[in-house]
Image (tube, grey):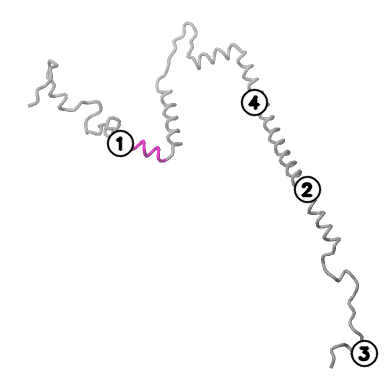
Amino acid sequence: MTDAPTEADGPAPTVPKDRRTRGSLTGRALVLALVVVTLFVALAVPVRTWFAQRAEIAQLRADVSATRERVEELRIEQERWQDPAFVAAEARRRLHFVLPGEIGYVTLGVEASQEEAAALAAAAAAPWYATLWGAVRQADDPATTKDAGGTDARGGAKGAKDAKDVNDAPADGAPAADG
């Protein structure tokens, strides 16, 4: 038997000559895809630059607006300083000036409380290791360590000298003989 088709088997299958059935990617589609990718790559950099410039312009406009507000605030402050009553009030407040015949008083402790508040704020802002190191240094220095009972670290009263120093000192100021 031969493998060749015979007339009895019927007509031989024909291969269609239509190009559409040959494959899904034609030459035109390949060229179109290549053009689209080239356009995308060519436009990516300018579009990115355009967006960056738009963001920079927006930032600069915000800076200009903030600067204009600051200029307006400074203009208002300059107008205030043109007023002699404002200048006199600031001199009294800042420099403690008094008018002739007035008695000036300075209260003590107000500034100290502001300083203490600033120190507490700084201590709260300090990192934990700085607080720990400060506590260690304070514990090592008996002159600054005080307990709640009003005694220093050695057990004596605040500001009192050691009992030996006070009781053993001679009345005439001469050094005491140890014995």
Quadrant where the N terminus is found in the figure: bottom right
Quadrant where the C terminus is found in the figure: top left
Q: Are marks 1 and 2 in contact (CB under 8 Å)?
A: no
Label 3: state its secondary structure.
loop
Label 2: state its secondary structure.
helix
Q: Which residue in the structure is indicated by mark 1? A: 139
Residue at the image point whose x is 82% and y is 60% from the top? 30
How far across and how far down the image is residue 98, in percent?
Answer: 48, 10
How far across and how far down the image is residue 10, in percent?
Answer: 91, 88
Viewer-nearest residue: 129 or 151: 129
Q: Is residue 1 above or below residue 91?
A: below
Among the two numbered marks 3 and 2 on one chain, the one whose residue lies closer to the N terminus: 3
Tell me the kind of residue under disc 1: Ala
- Side (left or right) of 150 relative to 95: left
Q: Is residue 31 above or below residue 120?
A: below
Measure the C-alpha gap from mark 2 to mark 4.
44 Å
Q: Is residue 134 magenta?
A: yes
Task: Characterize the local packing of mark 4: few (<14), some (14-19) or many (20 or more) Cα atoms within 10 angstroms.
Answer: few
Segment tinted magenta in the rendering: 128-137
Measure the C-alpha gap from mark 3 to mark 2.
61 Å
Q: Are marks 2 and 4 in contact (CB under 8 Å)?
A: no
Select label 4 or label 1 by which is in front.
Answer: 1
Q: Which residue in the structure is indicated by mark 4? A: 70
Q: Which residue in the structure is indicated by mark 2? A: 42
- Residue 7 image label: 3
Among the two numbered marks 4 and 1 on one chain, the one whose residue lies closer to the N terminus: 4
Among the two numbered marks 2 and 4 on one chain, the one whose residue lies closer to the N terminus: 2
How far across and how far down the image is residue 47, in percent?
Answer: 76, 44
Among the two numbered marks 3 and 1 on one chain, the one whose residue lies closer to the N terminus: 3
Label 1: state its secondary structure.
helix
Among the two numbered marks 4 and 3 on one chain, the one whose residue lies closer to the N terminus: 3
Select label 2 or label 4 by which is in front.
Answer: 2
